[in-house]
Image (tube, coloured by chain):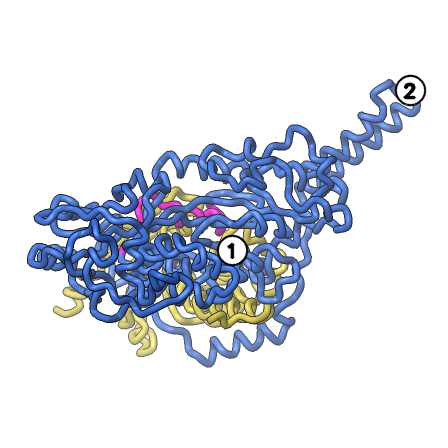
Chain colours: A yellow, B blue
Amino acid sequence: MDELSTGELSTRVAWDALYADLAPRVYNYFRYRLGSDTDVEDLTSRTFEKAWRSRAHYRHDIAGFSTWLFKIAQNVGADYRAARRSHLPLEAARDVAVDGTPERHAELRSDLARLAALTASLPARERELIALKYGASLNNRLIAELTGLSESNVGTILHRLVKTLRTRWYGDVSSSDE
Amino acid sequence: MNDDFLHRLRKAPPPEFLDGLKARLERQSPLAATRTRRLPFSRGLIIGLLLGGAAFAVTSLSVNRAPASFTDFLKAPAQLLARMGGSSQSEKSQQRRVVPWGPVWGPKHAVPAEETPSGTDFAAAAPAAVTNTPSTAATGRLPGTERASTQTPLPATQSASLASRFFGFTVVAPPATYPHAQAVSQHLAKGIGGMKVSLDTGRDTVSRLCSTDDKSGGADLIELPGRMTPSELRNCDFIITELKVGRQAVVTARSKLYGSMTLSARALFLALARQVPVPSDPSLFMDNPYTTWNQIDNTLPDDRIHFFGPGIGLVQGKLAAVLLLEVGCNTYPQIADLRTTDPARYDEICLNIRADGAYEDGAESSGATVERLVREPTLLGVFSLSEFDSLKDRLAESVINGVQPSPETVAAGTYPNSRTLYLYTKQNSYAPNTLFGMIINAYLAPVTPYPYAPGDWGFVPLDATERADVEAILHRLHPKF
């Protein structure tokens, strides 16, 4: 049965489906990219508001909708990091262990903060790849489009990264267990 | 690669946040806002330079006296603009006549026949892959041109449906191809969010693509279980491109111990259909009375009619029914006529497998099926071509109308229990890294990337040569810039 009886309804259904699919992915992209839940809702909102305002300029013949939206998300994230860099660098996550406040300690205990701590020393490009792959759940082809790398290069870098992170992750777990 | 620890970090956003954001966005402006197409800066710059240059040249010529080719010279900027997409209405009309990109036809409002350029041969323009071009197109003259001069050409931008203007591609498929289209879309949905498949249960899939009056949301791409008919092409409001994407084929086979059967398509229909024509008066129908093959044709063995195949309520079973029954059904002219005069009755007769036990639903693995075929000499298994291919050392395939099933006979279109799937699109440009490109690439994958999707059962990808032909068609579309 064709549930779409009018063009407007068709657009509505497409929008609903796209929003349901992409909003959680953009949200998680920012979580992974920032290594914290702080400001993630704000950045997700900014991304969708920008996309919504510019939707008339979106051309599906040039890029897929996901690619276009995540390009906006990348720009929103870059602006955010540039604005905050002077007073809250991401590298601060590395020092979180010596911060004695209970809130900081709790944050460290969270897996996300652990990821931030483990990736803090990585170059920005690698952190971006992790966020796109595991936060946004994009495939390597789309990541390649967004980062300008080749698809095979994306796969190779990610493979190497995951291997390194896994070693650190489980090493970290065993050391914290002791 | 064990990366579970990274996947586990994902969490769902708070529902109140998602709902609030969505509501806020939708309050900002209506959803179905009309897209305002802005001229890209680079294109605007080029057009500006051309216009400026042309104005300068004209001024210069008028001062220094015009040469004999002055008139032609004046036309040059307009022709250049036309090629860049900035053509006037009359020039767009000219473009419609020439149809420069592929085996494409369509605009019913084309041009008077006598104005058709002598060199315009659509069949010649089409790559060799499209050999069975409908005769109306093969003539190189657009049909229906007698009423052409009374109609107005459409702006090219109208080719995008409402949904596609906003989000991406709307693919519309009739029930016959919907499962396959859905299999492709589900595969793509993991990576991109722009393909939406809409089932068209009526018989107006073509109008969803072709009609400017369509009220049901339009389509950017349709997948059909055969070629569009000449009249559908004639009545299409748009220039469209035809792409062959693959085939579907099923095979009936016994165990190799008992040898193959040689059947006609009609005998297969009479053995399997729920209702069959009364022999003395084929305009009347009866519940299928045949229990042995020699009741249908006395040259066939006195063996029990007994099939074993996918459940008839499943996607696979429905495809098997179509491919096994329809060709034999259409050997009766009065039934074939029902396709246009009474489609519901046609479907009832030609697409329904009998439910009296002669056809058994099976859910076993291929290996278990083969073992059962060894135990039961009269049992015919129903397989997809790829399943059969992997088991052919143990199976003896039925020869239908003298043709053995094989990738070659399926590709040649001579094997009766197969059909070719076609895509039709209004898209007039192509690049592999666009949404359209990704969708097409998914359709044309040499080895199916979704082998376990029910909708992909029976699908036979194009061979390398045919795929190259389709790619040649695609690359004749306007490239992306």
Pointer 2: what residue?
B64
Residue, far bottom? B16
Residue B444 position by quadrant: top left
List the residue tagged with mark 1: A68
Q: Position of residue B192 (x, y in %)?
A: 43, 57
Q: Residue at x 61, y 60 (%)?
A: A54
In the rendered image, residue B473, in percent from the top left (x then y), is placed at 50, 38
Asked whether the residues under marks 2 and 1 belong to the same chain, the reply is no
Q: How many marks?
A: 2
> Going 70% across and 51% down the picture, which residue do you hit?
B154
Q: Mark 1 lies on which chain?
A: A
Q: Which of these two is toward me, B331 or A109?
A: B331
Q: Residue at x 27, y 46 (%)?
A: B400
Question: Where residue B83 sits in the image (x, y, percent)?
Answer: 68, 36
Magenta span: B433-451
In the drawing, does residue B356 fall left or right of residue A135?
left
